[in-house]
Amino acid sequence: MPFSAKDLQRYRKDEKFNHRLMTPEERVKLLRPYLPSPPPRDGARRASLSQVSREERKGKLGVRRFLRRHFHIFVYALIHFYFSIYIRLRQAYHAIGNRFYTVYHHHHHSPELIQRDIKDLSRLPKHLSVILTLEDQGRSGAGLEKLVNEAADIAAWSASAGISQLSIYEKTGILKGYVKETHQTISQRLQTYFGPSFPSVSLGAPHIPPVQSGLLSLSNSPNNENRKNISILLISAEDGRDSIVDLTKTLAEMSQRKKLQAADITTELVDAELSESVMEEPDLLVLFSPFVELAGYPPWQIRLTEIFHVPDNQGVGYQVFYRALCKFAKAQMRMGR
């Protein structure tokens, strides 16, 4: 409520004389009618109680949130701990198994020992394919040298086992630029295994003429019936999906120009074209990686291929090669039935 003119005049006059005209009690008595009424004490008490309850509730929720968060962290750490133990035990188990195969089945650069290992197998793949990995992208040169040596070892094992066709997949295709050098290394490795009468080697790649050698040494061998020629094909990622895309474009253009009917484009035609331009479908694909990773391997050529790998394996080894042949001999080829 506004001040009355009389009270307002009295208050200003007292203020003008520095509050000397009225005592403090008189000023309080003058202003009291114009002050707002104080809130009831029960309401104030209820307001304070509600504020305290909200603070207590907030405190309880904070504690629950803290406990819930740390409980989730504890469960995550527990799962991670037990899973780490499982991974370590699995790696140790596979390492022991690989070591056993390495010691018990070691080729010692001898084709006779390799033939002894496989003599009880019911069948062998006619076309073997492997996936190799280039370390450090070949920047230091050591990765390329290791890759060539691994290809030479696998070629020697395949020739010793009587496998006549081998395809080596490496994603970047760096081996295609070193066909002559790779062929020379493989020939030297075969000579280490077989001696002067080593099998002839044909090394090539899609759209690259093959390099051949070793024909004379084979004809002069007294045991030439046991020395089979080996044909090696180098493939890379560009021979996979890119080849399918190029073939699709070619067939589409031929169909638009009326050189080919749409009804003539069948699975058999695509299979024949890809087999001629890239390679035929391998019987067995061996991975030397610790897990299954095809890394862009030509998808069309592995529709019915048996794929083998050893979990937690590191590097190319004869034990993986031998176990793959054993697994292939026991596999049942149902062909979709």
Image (cartoon, rainbow, N blue to C red):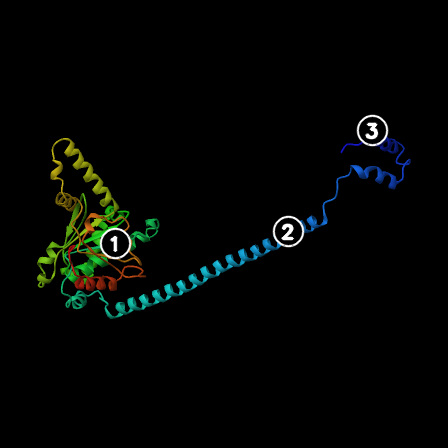
- Residue 102 locus on image (x, y percent): 27, 67
Q: Earlier in the sequence, mark 2 or mark 3?
A: 3
Query: Which residue lies under the disc numbered 2?
Result: 50
CA distance for labels 1 and 2: 72 Å
| Front of the two marks 1 and 3 | 3
Q: Earlier in the sequence, mark 1 or mark 3?
A: 3
Q: Amino acid at mark 3?
A: Ala
Whether the residues at callouts 1 and 2 have beta carbons within 8 Å, the answer is no
- Residue 52 locus on image (x, y percent): 65, 53
Whether the residues at callouts 1 and 3 have beta carbons within 8 Å, the answer is no
Which residue occupies 27% across, 58% down?
Answer: 288
Query: Which residue lies under the disc numbered 3?
Result: 5
In the image, residue 260 above or below residue 70: above
In the image, residue 235 above or below residue 103: above
Q: Amino acid at mark 1?
A: Ile
Which residue occupies 30% across, 57% down?
Answer: 291
| Front of the two marks 2 and 3 | 3
- Secondary structure at badge 2 equals helix
Query: Which residue lies under the disc numbered 1?
Result: 131
Q: Earlier in the sequence, mark 1 or mark 2?
A: 2
Question: Which is more toward the observer, 2 or 116?
Answer: 2
Tag 1: Cα neighbours inside 10 Å, few (<14), some, or many (≥20)?
many
Q: Quadrant of the C terminus?
A: bottom left
CA distance for labels 1 and 3: 104 Å
Q: Amino acid at mark 2?
A: Ser
